Amino acid sequence: MDTGSHLLFGTTLTGLAMLHPEVSADPVLFQAMLTATMVGSQAPDFDTLARVRGYSTYIRVHRGVTHSLPALFVWPLVLALPIAWTFGVWAHVGLLLAWIFAAVGFHVLLDWFNAYGVQCFRPFTRKWQHLDVLSIFDPFLFALHAGGVLWWIASGTNPGLLFVAVYAVTAGYIAVRAAHHLRVVARVRHQLPYEGIYQVAPGFHWFRWQFVVETEDCFYTGHVRGKHVEVKDIYVKEAFDSIVEASKSTDGVRAFLQFAQRIHVSCSAGQDGYVVKWRDVRFWYNHQLPFGVDVMLDRDMKVTGYSFGWKKKAWAPPFV
């Protein structure tokens, strides 16, 4: 999910940790716990530093090894020891380890539930996992946890039981969204006549979803509004020719192919050569495919350059 939500959930995990009498009674341990859960909630996304080495490196690294099964155990060790040393709470280092593990695990779990995906089962598989249940920012979860923090500040009381309720509602909400997602997928399958792979992704609105259907020959994209299913665009799959194959030599295309799942390729000719456009149809929006790689080649099919990333404004959908 987004950075702000992860930091907020780190704060509410501290409130939950105050069920331990020693955390609620010791201001120094409380500060150490707050630091531990907030940093732990953000730690898997430290891989965004790879952006300085270019977008291709970022795509290869982001939500990969830092979100893997071994990372669930490495992050607590990396973070708990310096935090215990900084605050002088060595006697409670085990408690810090446990709550950092919870913070990291909750981060990875939430990322698994959205549409971008995460390689959370590495090293057993590098396959991208995504449950397509939650958007990158969920207004309900943010409001729920922010409301809990405001109540905590206003009341000044031990928030342990309050956040037991908050996390119980969180679990129930995610379960309801998951069940709703299954119903929407079934509805789209029932109303459309295509044989293929169906993927339905959430939006900010509870009853608005968008889908991609991949068949042998085409991609169909569309919306679900309540019970209404509508196909918006059709993208015909084009055969890979020698020009498309030549574009695979670029680092950007190699990184794209490691991540993308619904791949559409198009090739156009110009006065100076060719442009090959690789797109991931999962992230369509408003009749456009904004995520992918554009590779420029000359008439001899030699790569002259490429651009990789989002062809949209930072504040424009889709938010993944």
Image (cartoon, rainbow, N blue to C red):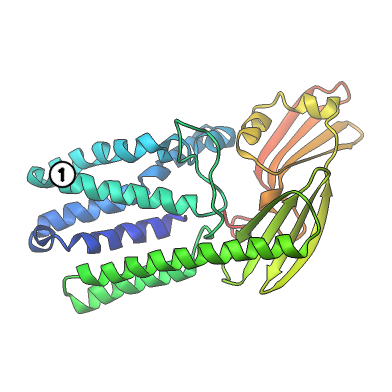
Residue 7 in the image: above or below residue 79? below
Q: Which one is in front, 104 or 189?
A: 189
Residue at the farthest bottom position: 155
Relative to 210, is 143 on the left or the right? left
Name the spot of residue 51 as percent of width and height, x first. Answer: 51, 38
Q: Residue at x 84, y 23 (%)?
A: 301
Residue 238 in the image: above or below residue 232? above
Which amino acid type is shown beneath numbered disc 1? Gly
Relative to 140, is 25 on the left or the right? left
Name the spot of residue 9 as percent of width and height, x first. Answer: 35, 60
Relative to 228, is 146 on the left or the right? left
User: Is residue 60 visible in the rendered structure shown here?
Assistant: yes
Name the spot of residue 78 as percent of width and height, x first. Answer: 26, 36
Residue at the farthest right position: 271
Name the spot of residue 85 as percent of width and height, x first. Answer: 13, 40
Q: How many marks?
A: 1
Residue 315 in the image: above or below residue 44? below
Q: Residue at x 15, y 44 (%)?
A: 94
Which residue position holds label 1? 94
Disc 1 is placed on an element classified as helix
Q: Residues within 10 Å of mark 1 (few under 14, many from 20)?
A: some
Relative to 235, is 3 on the left or the right? left
Q: Residue at x 16, y 71 (%)?
A: 158
Q: Residue at x 9, y 42 (%)?
A: 90
User: Is residue 316 visible in the rendered structure shown here?
Assistant: no
